[in-house]
Image (spheres, grey):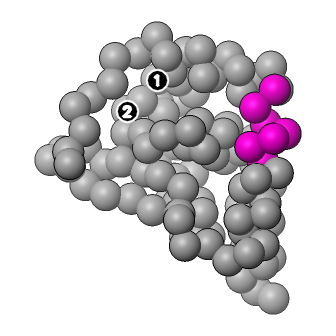
Amino acid sequence: MKTIARLFKALSDETRLRILSLLLYEELCVCDIMAVLQLPQSTVSRHLAYLKNAGWLDDRRCGVWMYYSIVDSGNSLQKSLLESLRENLSGLEMAVADRERLCGFSQHNRCA
């Protein structure tokens, strides 16, 4: 029950929902998320750590960059919630604006 509560609690913040909305489509570097959300590194990193600790995200280091992505191995509830988020967040004005801003930034070279 605590795991389920932690999953839902992580979704109770607008910034975390915006981050998940961006990560539903691709792996992103912290710097890309900072630029899109126009938030300082400390704020973005805190929210990313919260989402990771709640079981929503995986991370990987590539040189000096840290990349985040949605977990692949979530449970059935989590997979269902991700599908619902994908359907419901994709059309929201703020999510659309975030994706458009992301498309305007050059992507860093990704490590294989």
Residue under numbered circle 2: 31
Left or right? Give the position of 37 relative to 40. right
**Residue designated by label 1:** 35
Say if residue 15 shows up in the picture: no
User: Regarding mark 2 in the picture, which secondary structure is present there?
Assistant: helix
Under circle 1, the secondary element is: helix
Residue visible at 25% across and 38% down in the picture: 110
Residue 62 vertical position relative to residue 21 in the rendered view, above or below: below
Q: Residue at x 37, y 32 (%)?
A: 31
In the picture provided, is 85 more to the left or to the right than 56?
right
Instruction: Give x and y (percent) for residue 10.
Output: 71, 61
- Is residue 72 placed above or below 66 in the rendered structure? below
Q: Main secondary structure of the magenta part?
A: helix
Q: State which region is magenta.
A: 85-91
Dividing the picture into quarters, in which one does residue 99 lie? top right
Q: In the image, what residue occupies the spot 57% across and 27% down?
A: 37
Residue 57 horizontal side relative to residue 19, left or right: left
The picture places residue 87, in percent across and down from the top left corner, at 81, 41
Inspect the magenta stretch and tell me whether residue 99 lies in it: no
Which residue does the image show at 47% across and 52% down from the upper left?
A: 69
Determine if residue 23 is in view. Answer: yes
Give the amino acid type for the residue marked by disc 1 in the picture. Answer: Ala
Q: Nearer the viewer, residue 60 or 45?
A: 60
In the rendered image, residue 38, in percent from the top left (x then y), is placed at 54, 23
- Outermost residue toward the top in this view: 104
In this rendering, is residue 77 above or below 10?
below
* Badge 2 vs badge 1, beta-carbon distance below 8 Å: yes
Question: The N terminus lies in which quarter of the figure?
Answer: bottom right
The amino acid pointed to by label 2 is: Cys
- How crowded is the residue under tag 1: few (<14 C-alpha within 10 Å), some, or many (20+)? some
Give neighbour class at mark 2: few <14, some 14-19, many 20+ (Cα, 10 Å).
Answer: some
What is the CA distance from the residue labelled 2 to the residue labelled 1? Answer: 6 Å
